[in-house]
Each structure stands twice: as structure tokens, then as C-alpha cells.
Amino acid sequence: VVGFGDGHLTLEGGQDWNQWGPGRWQQATLGPRPHFWAADSLRPDVNVGFEGTAERFWAARRGYRTPGEGPPLPQLRLRFGGDRWEYVKVTARRMGMSPDSAAYLVAHRGTLRLGDWKFGATELMTLGGGAPDLLLLLPGIPLKFAEHEGGDRANIALSGDVEWTLRGHGRIYGELLVDDYSGPPLSFRGNKFGITAGGAWQDPFGLPAQLQAEYSSVDPWMFGHQTRDGAMSHYGALLGSRLPPNSRAVTVAADFPLPAGLEGGLEYRFRQRDLKSRGSSIFDVYGFTPDGASTPDERDTKAFLELDVETRHGADAVARRAWRHVEVHGGAGFLHVRNWRGNAGAGLTTPTGFAGFTLRY
């Protein structure tokens, strides 16, 4: 990514990951450091462009660094603001259902700080079947009105978030992401929400450390839309999330200084996911099976974590060392899984390890 600007106006272009939706540490959509994660562990399906199998899922086309993750998106980012407010607009392009089909993401976010409170609002559009209208690329133009234009090839999500800073102590925050809302009851499958709530505690008990905790959940049918002329209206271009549809997670972590200029960290992650209930994949379409057959008796209420729920426990210890232009990090931990990928009784326990470096220039 390259860019130019000052503290009040920045224009960037290049390829980058972007986070859309509930995630770790309130990865606020279109935040200062966006990262994109498609829903991981998506079921392979030859009808939607997958080339892998259940045994060789890593070979599936949709898996950049982890299974199901999207590749970096070519994009333009415009960011401007003042002392109390900020606005960012992102226009990105990614591959659709096949290598020669294009899909686009258009999104914008505004934040306003009032004293110790910060309020944010985000609007995102996933568009397939053609380039976005030039009007949608202008800053400040609402995207919701265009969801059903152009043959209903777009999907919109809206979010609102709030953060309370406790000066000298930390922060508390929450975010509600709404894909669709159809009115009461909330159990109706057309009401699709993502929820994030968490906080950070700085220097707990006078120790030089930071503690963080966060809860997130994503409803069934989240991030998907409907079919139109035999094609998914989002064209396989996921709004995506660190959490996939029909899941919830709790993450707890601590960061602290170590000798020799090192920074240490401990992190524990708990995640549950239902891979079998309807609406657990973004390629599920209400009223139809994956091969296009009609399902007229399908239930119209959400099935949240009902069938052979996969449960994951993971923990890591990490050490980091930063210089002016380079950061090096590495760590080790474990992963324990019950009902692995929705297979009742299947388990997985394995040590984990990782290492990497980041260049800053």
C-alpha cells in the first residue's frame, strides 16, 4: 500500500486485507489498520468455484493464508477528518465466482468523539455483476438505497458502535452489525446480526501490562444474500468476518514488557461454530439446496449452534522485538477441538507455532 497526505487528509492505494464484521479487539470495520478475513472453514463446493476436497481443504482456491481467507484486495482508501471526527471511504475489487468475474466492495465509515465517548457508523456494499455506479464512489453518499438496484446484485450491511475511554484505565466498547432486519420476532431467519462487546484494562493493579477481553457472535444467514438469474447476488465476494456465520467466540489476552527490549503476550481463544444447520454457510440460500432443489418446508427461524457444534480452545505465548523499520515476532501454543468441522465425536489436539517479521517504511 502506498499513499500520501497529512494528519487530516490521506489517500492510499494498493493491495491490503480488510476486516468486515465482528472480530478480535473490535477490529472496527474500516479502522486505521483494516484486515480482511473471509469466513474460515467454508465447505468446499464445486458449484461455487472451490477446487479442494474435504480431505485436502487447504487446496481450495478460496484460502490465501488460512482456509477460506480472501486474498489482499486491490483498493483505494480515502481518509479525512478533524480533531473530533474522521471519515474513510474504501473501494476494492476482488474475484467473483470464477477468475473472469469481477466483484466489488464499497464501504465507508464515520466516527465522532465527544469527550470520553466515541461513536461510529459503517455502511458496506458487496456488489457483483458489474462495476459500481460512479455516484457510489463519492464520499458521503449513502449506499443502502442502491442495494436493490441493478438487478438486485448487491448486499448491504450496516453497523453502529460506541466506545467509552476510562482515562488512565482503559476502554469499554460494543458494536452491532446488521445485515438484514425484518421486524419481530428476532428469531426470524431474516434478522441477521453480529455483536461485539469487550474492553481493555491498562496497567492492572499497577503492573506494566494491558489486559483485554472480547465476546463476539454472528447469526446464521449472515453475510449472504439471495440468488438472481441462477447466480449468488454477492458473486462470492464475501463481506466476510473473522467469525463465520452461526458462531461465537471469547478472546482474552495480556501484553507485557520483557527484558532486552522484548514485548511478551499471552492469549486464549474459545470459539464455537455450527457447520451443519442451514444458514451456516454464505452459499446457503433460503428455500433451496446447494444443487438448486426447492425446499418449501424449510423452517423460517434461525438455528443458532444446534447441530454437532465444533468447539475450539487455543492458547499462544508470543514474544516481539521492534526496531525502527523491522518487527520480529514468534510464539508457540496449542489447539484443542471437539466435533472437528462438525463431525460428531471427532477431535483434534495439536501444538502450534509461528514466526514472522514486518517491515515498516
Image (tube, grey):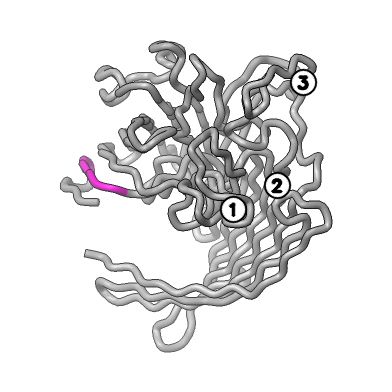
User: Would you place residue 300 above or below residue 302 in this image?
Assistant: above
Q: Gap between marks 3 and 1, in whole Å?
A: 39 Å
Neighbor class of circle 2 (other Cα within 10 Å; few <14, some 14-19, many 20+) is many
Of pointers 3 and 1, the one earlier in the residue sequence: 1
Of pointers 1 and 2, the one earlier in the residue sequence: 1
Which residue shows up at 44% across the image and 21% down it? 154
Amino acid found under the numbered disc labelled 1: Gly
Amino acid found under the numbered disc labelled 2: Arg
Amino acid found under the numbered disc labelled 3: Glu
Going by the picture, which residue comes out furthest to the right? 345
SS state under label 1: strand
Instruction: Label the magenta part by its dominant secondary structure.
Output: strand
Quarter of the picture holding the C terminus: bottom left
- The answer to whether residue 90 shows anywhere in this view is no
SS state under label 2: strand
Report the residue marked by disc 2: 273
Q: Is residue 341 left or right of residue 224?
A: right
Q: Gap between marks 1 and 2, in whole Å?
A: 23 Å
Of circles 2 and 3, the one toward us is 3
SS state under label 3: loop
Q: Which residues are magenta?
A: 8-15
Neighbor class of circle 1 (other Cα within 10 Å; few <14, some 14-19, many 20+) is many
Query: Magenta span has 354?
Result: no
Which of the pair 229/103 is nearer the observer? 229
Residue 181 image position (x, y, % from top left): 62, 20
Report the residue marked by disc 1: 199
Which of the pair 9/321 is nearer the observer? 321
Report the residue marked by disc 3: 298
Of pointers 2 and 3, the one earlier in the residue sequence: 2
